[in-house]
Amino acid sequence: MQTYSLFELNEYIRRILALNLPDAVWVTCEIAQFNESRGNYFLELVEKSEEEDTIIARTEAALWGPNYRQLRKKIGKKLVDILQEGLEVKVQVRVSFHERYGLKMVIEDVDPTYTLGKLALKRQQTIERLEKEGKIDQNAQLELPSVLQRIAVLSSPTAAGLQDFENQLRFNPYHYHYQVDLFPTAMQGDRVSEEMRTQLRKISKREHLYEVVVIIRGGGARLDLQAFNDYDLCAALADCPLPILTGIGHDIDETVADLVAHQSLKTPTAVAEYLIQHNAAFEGELMLLAQQLTQISQLELQLAENELLKYQQVLQLGSNNKLEQLEVELKHLQQLLNPLSKIKLQKEQLALDQFSQVISLLDLEATLARGYSLTVKGGKVIQSKTELSPEDEIEIRFKDGSVDGKISSS
């Protein structure tokens, strides 16, 4: 069996690759690692199994500085957005094999439409899955409290939009007070979904302390927003027990997170203004109700005063009529009383005269004048003979005098 030195074998491999792959070829893959050193870029490219999400192929690639600058002029800022870990890319590579340095793929071109198309497809699949599970409108169906003052904010502490959001709330023209609690989280890269879901779990355990959750990001490139199309993150947002407002900071593209949120606004400042106007609308309703209440109470008071005046007039008229009726009755009684009183007086006078006559007849002097006498013993009038005994001394009184006598025995 023939034996080769390592150099001979590598040189053989180099010649085979040079013969079979003389030109650059297009390769689809995923960027696993991306590093920069001295103006050159070194990538680890992988391919994953669709069924198990495991790596089935891996290789290293290089994008030399001059080539990178040419691509930046050709593609623009999208190149920076595409060359991110975790994104699927379509790159044109020239396969190079060196006897000393081994196999290397040198990137010569990048197709941005492939990455954007893959991301769009993944976004649509996420939306369809959420719709199938009934989560796409789940958070939007939560009732938004009338007053929003206690706010849980998901954002990076260094996010440019966070300061704008807080200043807009702090210096609002109505002088409303807001409690803003920051739950720090990454806002771009592959850590967004995991960190944000962790913070959402913390907020859910304290849901009684807040009325709303706000996601603040600020500006950024289009591809930086891909983390907000992640299914796991969007499902967690849909399941949040509190209404969610998003202000991720983009004018055209709408992420899936925006779709599942209770309310999506373009910028952090717009979210703050929404909170201010929401409370102002509630205050306006209260003021309108207060005005209506004042008007109704004044109307009711006026009606009550009118009703009272009506009863007062009726009562006055009724009392006057009653007084007139009583005066008529009193005059009638007075007219009846005069002859009746005279008759009564005549009867009483007649009875009095009769009593006077009886008294006159019963007078002692008058009785003695009619021929009667009065027998007295010891100053006591004798009414029966049984009151007398023999030898009793008595006095017999007549109209013209009296005589003394003694009872004789019989």
Image (spheres, rainbow, N blue to C red):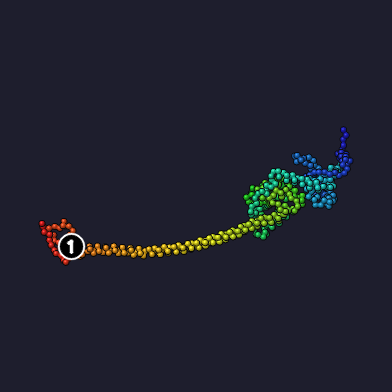
Task: Give 279 or 11, whichever is nearer the viewer.
Answer: 279
Query: What residue is drawn where x is 88% and y is 40%?
Result: 20
Q: Answer whether residue 11 is visible to the viewer in this image.
A: no
Query: What residue is drawn where x is 33% and y is 63%?
Result: 343
In the picture, which quadrant includes the N terminus?
top right
Q: Furthest residue to the top?
A: 1
Task: Give 15 or 250, whichever is nearer the viewer.
Answer: 250
- Relative to 388, residue 8 above or below: above
Q: Position of residue 286 (x, y in %)?
A: 62, 57
In the picture, which quadrant includes the C terminus?
bottom left
Q: In this image, 378 relative to 60: left or right?
A: left
Q: In this image, 164 relative to 75: left or right?
A: left
Q: In this image, 293 relative to 24: left or right?
A: left
Query: What residue is drawn where x is 40% and y is 64%?
Result: 331
The residue that disc 1 covers is 372
Q: Position of residue 380 (x, y in %)?
A: 18, 61
Q: Position of residue 127 (x, y in %)?
A: 73, 46
Task: Give 274 or 183, whichever is nearer the viewer.
Answer: 274
Q: In this image, 142 relative to 68: left or right?
A: left
Q: Answer whether residue 22 is visible to the viewer in this image.
A: yes
Binning the other alpha carbons within 10 Å of mark 1 as few (below 14), some (14 to 19) or many (20 upward) gives: few
Number of disc labels? 1
Q: Furthest residue to the bottom?
A: 400
Q: Position of residue 36 (x, y in %)?
A: 80, 49
Say what secondary structure mark 1 lies in.
loop
Q: What is the three-letter code of the residue carrying label 1?
A: Tyr
